[in-house]
Image (cartoon, grey):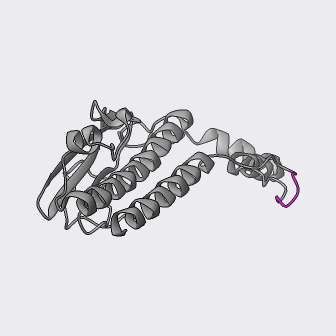
Amino acid sequence: MKRILVCAVMIVFVCSLMLALEGCGKKAAPGAAGTPPPRPSKREGRQRGREKQAPAAKEAAAAVPAAQPATTPPTPAPAAAAAIAQNETKAIGNSRVIVGAEVAYHAATGAYGTLDALINATPPYLDKSFASGKKDGYVYTVTGAGDKFTCTAVPETPGQTGVKRCFVDESGVIRHTTDGTEPSASSPPVS
């Protein structure tokens, strides 16, 4: 009876998580019922401010050469930044799915399992999309034995498929780093 209850709770958890992930990134159309009208962008606001400048101020501004910024790393294009953010959101969601699978597996077997054990169990606790260890631009490493498990999710191509590196263990707290270092139990939790 306890196993059935745990499995039912896990199914509800996974289904609600999948529904939440499907809703990520969807925005209501501007002007749709209940949505505020779109605000002007920063660029539009700056343009309006420039148009209001006096002609003499425009000429003075044109005479002063623009300062060259110090060498900084290139920032990803808006589309790339959006893809990175989406992959990072999915990595956190996939880490939660792995935690749920580990909890259910532990309840059924008395021990935590590896990624292969979770996928190849009967019934499987994770679907085959995790079989390669790569999903949604991230590489997942899961170790488990006895009463301990760890899962790390790192970008497949750092800076292109993601920046955040995630870590979770049997505590269920998902932690991350953004500076390229390996995440651990002492890394800050995802907010």
Which residue is drawn at the image coordinates 29% and 42% (left, top)?
122
Give coordinates of residue 188: x percent, y percent.
29, 67
Give coordinates of residue 138: x percent, y percent.
33, 38
Q: Range of the magenta residues?
A: 31-35
Which residue is drawn at the image coordinates 35% and 45% (left, top)?
163
Is residue 32 at all visible to an observer of this figure?
Answer: yes
**The one of 23 and 191 positioned closer to us in this rendering:** 23
The reply, left or right, for residue 183 in relation to residue 164 is left
**The one of 32 and 128 positioned closer to us in this rendering:** 128
Instruction: Please state, as top left, top right, bottom left or bottom right, where the N terminus lies in the image.
Output: bottom left
* Identity of the residue furthest to the left in this view: 146
Give the tally of numbered discs.
0
Up/down of 174 relative to 47, above or below: below
Magenta segment, prevailing SS (helix, strand or loop): loop
* Identity of the residue furthest to the front in this view: 1
Give coordinates of residue 191: x percent, y percent.
42, 66
